[in-house]
């Protein structure tokens, strides 16, 4: 319905979906004017979303998350100044994503629930949330003055405004786990036991910019409505044929944008969605 509404209003839209199985639909969607699919996957699952214009790989994201911004320079015709600003935005956002909210890093959930994290702090994936002043990070993020789309349910599970980090820390430390489920044990993501500790100091957190985000698999992911495709030119070339005749995605992406972020679960799809949403708003500020 959202896609259909955007088409009728001639406005930009960026949506997030986990319905990667609908290959034929997404192929058709990309024949619509300005319709484009970006995907997140890993080396083992990237073939499942091979129809996407660009695939963000989990392995690359873990190695250097902000380097992903450079991949969109030509796609969105970004200036050097815009790239620097977007990189700062995403660096701060990633810290907030990992250390705040009910979908924070599972390591931080364990730490806030009093688990002994000694065995995990040297792992590349450990976010070190306890080392950051999240109040300052929240303030700097807002002071950048860049758009941040608040999604439905953010007040209850994701960061939406300064002060949320402290609020969610208190909630998680009361015995809550991922998405507010009861915290049951000090068990690591990989299944390694982490012994409880009654002497753990619970303090606001910190993150590494190379950390993979912890994200929910949306249980009721809505399939995009077919009516968004109605009325398109029957003679429109297929996505694969069109791709072979143009030199870059940049030729396709002009406002209004109709962008879909298609994520294989737990591959950094929320990072990519936030990046695409920001870029779309920067490049079509009066239409998004």
Image (tube, rainbow, N blue to C red):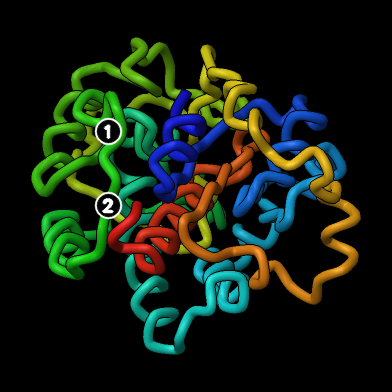
Left or right side of 132 for 5: right
List x then y, in percent, for residue 252: 65, 64
Residue that appears at 42% across and 39% down: 105
Whole-angstrom CA distance, mark 1 to mark 2, is 27 Å
Circle nearer the N terminus (1, 2): 1
| Most foreground residue, 72 or 112 | 72
List x then y, in percent, for residue 83: 44, 79
Question: Relative to residue 6, is residue 240 depicted above or below?
Answer: below
Q: Which residue is mark 2?
A: 148
Left or right side of 59 for 168: left
Q: Are marks 1 and 2 in contact (CB under 8 Å)?
A: no
Q: Nearer the viewer, mark 1 or mark 2?
A: 2
User: Residue 143 appears in which quarter of the rendering?
Assistant: bottom left
> Residue 269: in sight, yes or no?
yes
Left or right side of 176 for 43: right
Q: Which residue is mark 1?
A: 112
Question: Relative to residue 108, is residue 19 depicted above or below?
Answer: above
How many other residues sit within 10 Å of disc 1, few (<14), some (14-19) or many (≥20)?
many
Element under label 2?
Answer: loop
List x then y, in percent, for residue 181: 36, 12
Residue that appears at 49% across and 79% down: 78
């Amino acid at each position: 319905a959202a896609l259909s509404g955007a088409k009728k209003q001639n406005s930009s839209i960026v949506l997030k979906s986990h319905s990667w199985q609908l290959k034929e639909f997404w192929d058709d969607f990309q024949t619509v004017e300005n319709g484009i699919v970006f995907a997140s996957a890993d080396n083992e699952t990237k073939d499942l979303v091979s129809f996407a214009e660009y695939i963000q790989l989990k392995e690359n994201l873990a190695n250097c998350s902000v380097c992903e911004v450079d991949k969109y320079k030509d796609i969105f015709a970004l200036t050097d100044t815009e790239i620097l600003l977007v990189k700062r935005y995403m660096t701060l956002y990633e810290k907030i994503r990992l250390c705040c909210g009910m979908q924070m890093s599972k390591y931080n959930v364990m730490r806030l629930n009093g688990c002994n994290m000694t065995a995990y702090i040297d792992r590349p994936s450990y976010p070190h949330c306890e080392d950051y002043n999240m109040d300052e990070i929240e303030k700097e993020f807002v002071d950048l003055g860049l758009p941040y789309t608040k999604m439905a349910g953010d007040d209850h599970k994701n960061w939406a405004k300064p002060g949320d980090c402290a609020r969610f820390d208190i909630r998680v430390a009361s015995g809550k786990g991922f998405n507010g489920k009861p915290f049951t044990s000090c068990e690591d993501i990989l299944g390694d036991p982490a012994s409880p500790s009654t002497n753990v100091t619970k303090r606001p957190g910190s993150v590494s910019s190379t950390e993979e985000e912890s994200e929910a698999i949306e249980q009721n992911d809505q399939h995009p409505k077919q009516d968004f495709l109605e009325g398109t030119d029957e003679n429109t070339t297929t996505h694969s044929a069109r791709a072979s005749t143009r030199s870059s995605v940049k030729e396709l992406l002009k406002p209004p944008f109709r962008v879909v972020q298609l994520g294989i679960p737990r591959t950094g799809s929320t990072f990519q969605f936030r990046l695409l949403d920001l870029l779309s708003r920067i490049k079509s500020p009066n239409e998004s």
